[in-house]
Image (spheres, helix red, strand yellow):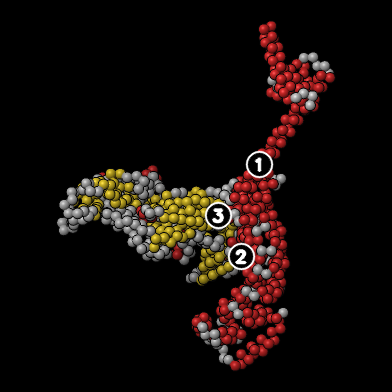
């Protein structure tokens, strides 16, 4: 190859450069400066950057990336030499090779993967992005051998797009999960070193296995009133019931406020959750300048309390508003509330009448407000009118944080002019109070309390503790539900698991408890006297928000081993495996040690899901319509109790949701499948696609099955008629004398009396009809003669029936 022939020549040049030039780029700053000068047009900087790489300096990796951006293929021999020597910055070199895009280096990258070098994963990714089909065999080998980077190899095969990989990918797609988690547990074991205190300290955590949902905003539009219509799609691989939290920001995303929306925000169910909502930005941001840029976001979660949140979707918006004629109330107010109405009118116009209404449910319902006019000295202007709203008469004992006030004016010149305020807080509620009656410590700490509230609202309690005389407070770990306590529960007991919250050292100090009562307002907190606690083992577990990692914090004795044994179980504790610990920190305190470990649960438990996502990605990238029937079979497993089957079904559903052309072609071809499950599922999906080729295929499909049904019906009718003819002929040969005996004979042949009478109204008619039908088919009589004789037969039978009735 050309590159090989140049290598000796290049190595000589390297020596010359190293001898003639001092080391460039003593700092990363100098290297970046050289890059900037190069892009400004100083091409001499190229040699300096190259020298920095050739020298193998501290910043050789950064130099490689810069050379990759420049894209000159002359540097490839240097790059190849570097990766063959396994330099520590080989990953950056491979990235630079990928940037240049020259496929001459593919054999060298393939060799790296064959040798399974430490940076083989980088080579696999580069081979995928270079899209050279020579890499397909080695990538397939990586997948078959299930190397640690097999998921990256699956994605690379997809990017290359070679259909040779399809059978392997489909086989990989159908392999059941090696681990089907039932109940996930994490166990931390500390072993004591002191013989006199021999024993094992262990703590088992019940880990709720959960992956956060995803959300995607498909489209949106804004109407002239400021309503924002948002269409979005939720996606959760575990088919959880999902919730969303809509919010908006007026300061570029620094702070967020709840958004007033219309539409469903909770309990979404299904494989793909598509829905829409309307953000009432006209209510939330009515006082914003027209130039203000708003940010709207929707955060998905699969817990109502927003515990496991996914990554939110954002909209950057600009909404214009017509100025309103009422002064907004910015602070929380109570009792008599001052209202200022702006109403500029030409001089000499008549005084207008104003009607005031309030709403506490975002404008869905409006109620008359009790107001009277006032004139504050020195504050009135020709353009403003002042009123007092006696809110306690309308909202006695209530506390609403989103009150809207509407003013309607009526007069000679203007009719129906309306102004609506920005939401404000009216608090006529008297907050609750609480007292601590007594405390007691058993296996947990008991706190007896009594609540007082004259309005007998539903009360919630917040329990905190402090180990530093009340200078700071932490939320206490309690059992039971202390929310929405009715008056019958105003007196009770709180169970505090102090061993979860307070360390051994802190237990030697006084501890305080604080209880805060809340209804719609925060009540006056009560703080306990100093408390002393016993000294049990202590530990905590927390879950990463989006990574799937688990963090464990705990304390242990000085004489325990400093390296704990950490294991996990996916079958409720029947079997245990060593956990992948990515981080561990041990700190020594006064008379104990603190430990913090991080378990990569996603690596141990969720690897199967990532593999399925990668396979689905590659199948979509390659796009072979022949596999669609298999995908349709997989799709029907969406309700399977087996997690791996559900996962495959969800990934298949995503492919069909995208509706690429290869999927559509495969669906059309599946219409002629002999498997009813395949073609009926294909029809259901195709009926949702509005495309001419799809409509034409469905039309042919329906016509085909209509013809099949007609043919089957005619064949059945002919079979039945032939059967009757044979029976009648047999009856004639056996000289069966009466109709009843004929029916009995037919019954013995498997034809019920009801079936026989349903097929022909009268046995005599059927015998005559059958004879005429045979003569017509044999050409012995014409159609005209057949019709004439058939009428004669009917008349004859009717005459016989009348005669029989007269005799009776």
Q: Are marks 2 and 1 in contact (CB under 8 Å)?
A: no
Q: Which of the two labelled residues, at mark 2 and mark 3, occupies the earlier sequence position?
A: 3
Q: Which of the two labelled residues, at mark 3 and mark 1, occupies the earlier sequence position?
A: 3
- At horizontal 22% and vertical 46% (from top left) the residue drawn is 411
User: Viewed as shown, does residue 463 lie left or right of 10?
Assistant: left
The vertical placement of 35 against 782, above or below, is: below
Residue 41 placement (x, y as % from top left): 51, 83
Which of the two residues, 270 or 458, is positioned nearer the viewer here? 270
- What secondary structure is marked by label 3? loop
Residue 60 appears in view: yes
Residue 644 placement (x, y as % from top left): 64, 54
- Residue where numbered disc 2 is placed: 580
Rounded to the nearest angstrom, the CA distance separating label 2 from label 3 is 25 Å
User: Viewed as shown, does residue 98 lie left or right of 490?
Assistant: right
Residue 220 placement (x, y as % from top left): 46, 55
- What secondary structure is marked by label 1? helix
Q: Specify the farthest residue to the right.
A: 733
Q: Using the image, tell me which numbered label, if any, was put on residue 703.
A: 1
- Residue where numbered disc 3 is placed: 236
Rounded to the nearest angstrom, the CA distance separating label 2 from label 1 is 59 Å
**Crowding near the residue tagged with mark 1, few <14, some 14–19, many ≥20 C-alpha atoms within 10 Å:** few
């Amino acid at each position: 190859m050309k590159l090989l022939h140049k290598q000796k020549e290049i190595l000589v040049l390297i020596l010359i450069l190293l001898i003639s030039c001092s080391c460039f780029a003593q700092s990363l700053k100098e290297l970046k400066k050289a890059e900037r000068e190069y892009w400004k047009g100083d091409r001499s900087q190229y040699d300096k950057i190259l020298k920095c790489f050739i020298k193998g300096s501290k910043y050789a990796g950064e130099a490689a990336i810069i050379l990759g951006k420049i894209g000159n293929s002359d540097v490839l021999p240097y790059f190849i030499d570097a990766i063959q020597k396994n330099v520590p910055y080989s990953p950056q070199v491979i990235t630079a090779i990928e940037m240049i895009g020259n496929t001459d280096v593919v054999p060298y990258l393939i060799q790296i993967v064959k040798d399974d070098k430490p940076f083989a994963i980088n080579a696999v990714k580069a081979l995928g992005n270079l899209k050279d089909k020579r890499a397909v065999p080695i990538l397939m080998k990586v997948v078959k051998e299930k190397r640690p980077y097999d998921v990256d190899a699956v994605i690379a095969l997809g990017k290359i797009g070679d259909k040779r990989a399809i059978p392997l990918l489909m086989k990989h797609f159908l392999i059941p999960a090696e681990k089907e988690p039932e109940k996930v547990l994490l166990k931390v074991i500390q072993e004591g070193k002191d013989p006199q205190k021999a024993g094992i300290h262990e703590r088992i955590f019940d880990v709720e296995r959960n992956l956060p949902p995803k959300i995607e905003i498909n489209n949106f539009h804004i109407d002239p009133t400021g309503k924002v219509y948002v269409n979005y799609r939720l996606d959760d691989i575990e088919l959880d019931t999902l919730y969303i939290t809509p919010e908006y920001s007026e300061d570029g995303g620094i702070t967020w406020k709840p958004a007033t929306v219309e539409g469903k925000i909770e309990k979404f169910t299904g494989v793909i959750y598509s829905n829409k909502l309307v953000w009432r930005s006209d209510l939330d941001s009515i006082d914003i300048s027209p130039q203000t840029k708003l940010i709207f976001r929707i955060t998905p979660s699969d817990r109502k309390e927003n515990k496991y949140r996914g990554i939110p979707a954002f909209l950057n918006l600009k909404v214009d508003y017509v100025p309103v004629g009422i002064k907004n109330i910015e602070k929380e107010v109570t009792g008599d509330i001052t209202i200022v109405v702006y109403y500029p009118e030409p001089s000499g116009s008549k005084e207008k009448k104003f009607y005031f209404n309030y709403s506490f449910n975002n404008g869905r319902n409006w109620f008359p407000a009790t107001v009277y006019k006032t004139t504050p000295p020195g504050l009135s202007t020709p353009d403003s009118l002042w009123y007092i709203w006696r809110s306690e008469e309308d909202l006695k004992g209530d506390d609403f944080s989103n009150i809207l006030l509407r003013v309607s004016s009526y007069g000679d010149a203007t009719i129906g002019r309306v102004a609506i305020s920005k939401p404000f807080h009216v608090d006529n509620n008297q907050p609750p109070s609480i007292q601590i009656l007594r405390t007691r410590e058993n296996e947990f700490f008991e706190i007896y309390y009594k609540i007082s509230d004259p309005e007998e609202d539903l009360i919630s309690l917040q329990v905190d503790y402090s180990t530093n005389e009340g200078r700071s407070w932490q939320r206490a770990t309690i059992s039971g539900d202390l929310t929405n306590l009715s008056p019958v529960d105003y007196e009770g007991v709180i169970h505090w698991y102090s061993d979860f919250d307070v360390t051994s050292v802190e237990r030697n100090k006084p501890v305080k408890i604080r209880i805060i009562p809340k209804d719609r307002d925060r009540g006056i907190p009560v703080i306990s006297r100093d408390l002393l606690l016993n000294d049990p083992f202590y530990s905590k577990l927390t879950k990463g928000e989006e990574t799937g990692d688990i963090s464990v914090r705990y304390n242990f004795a000085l004489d325990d081993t400093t390296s704990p044994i950490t294991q996990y179980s996916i079958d409720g504790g029947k079997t245990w495996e060593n956990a992948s610990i990515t981080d561990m920190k041990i700190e020594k305190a006064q008379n104990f040690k603190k430990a913090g470990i991080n378990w990569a649960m996603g690596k141990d438990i969720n690897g199967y899901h990532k593999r399925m996502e990668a396979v689905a990605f590659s199948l979509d990238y390659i796009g072979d319509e022949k596999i669609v029937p298999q995908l349709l079979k997989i799709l029907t497993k969406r309700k399977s109790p087996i997690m791996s089957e559900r996962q495959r079904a969800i990934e298949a559903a995503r492919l069909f949701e995208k509706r690429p052309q290869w999927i559509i072609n495969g669906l059309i071809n599946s219409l002629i499948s002999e498997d009813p499950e395949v073609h009926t599922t294909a029809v259901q999906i195709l009926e949702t696609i509005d495309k001419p080729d799809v409509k034409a295929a469905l039309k042919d499909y329906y016509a085909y099955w209509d013809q099949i049904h007609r043919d089957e019906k005619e064949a059945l009718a002919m079979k039945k008629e032939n059967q009757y003819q044979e029976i009648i002929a047999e009856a004639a040969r056996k000289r069966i004398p009466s109709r009843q005996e004929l029916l009995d004979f037919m019954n013995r042949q498997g034809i019920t009396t009801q079936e026989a009478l349903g097929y022909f109204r009268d046995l005599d008619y059927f015998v005559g009809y059958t004879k005429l039908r045979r003569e017509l088919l044999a050409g012995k009589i014409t159609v005209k003669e057949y019709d004439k004789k058939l009428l004669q037969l009917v008349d004859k039978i009717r005459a016989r029936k009348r005669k029989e009735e007269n005799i009776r």
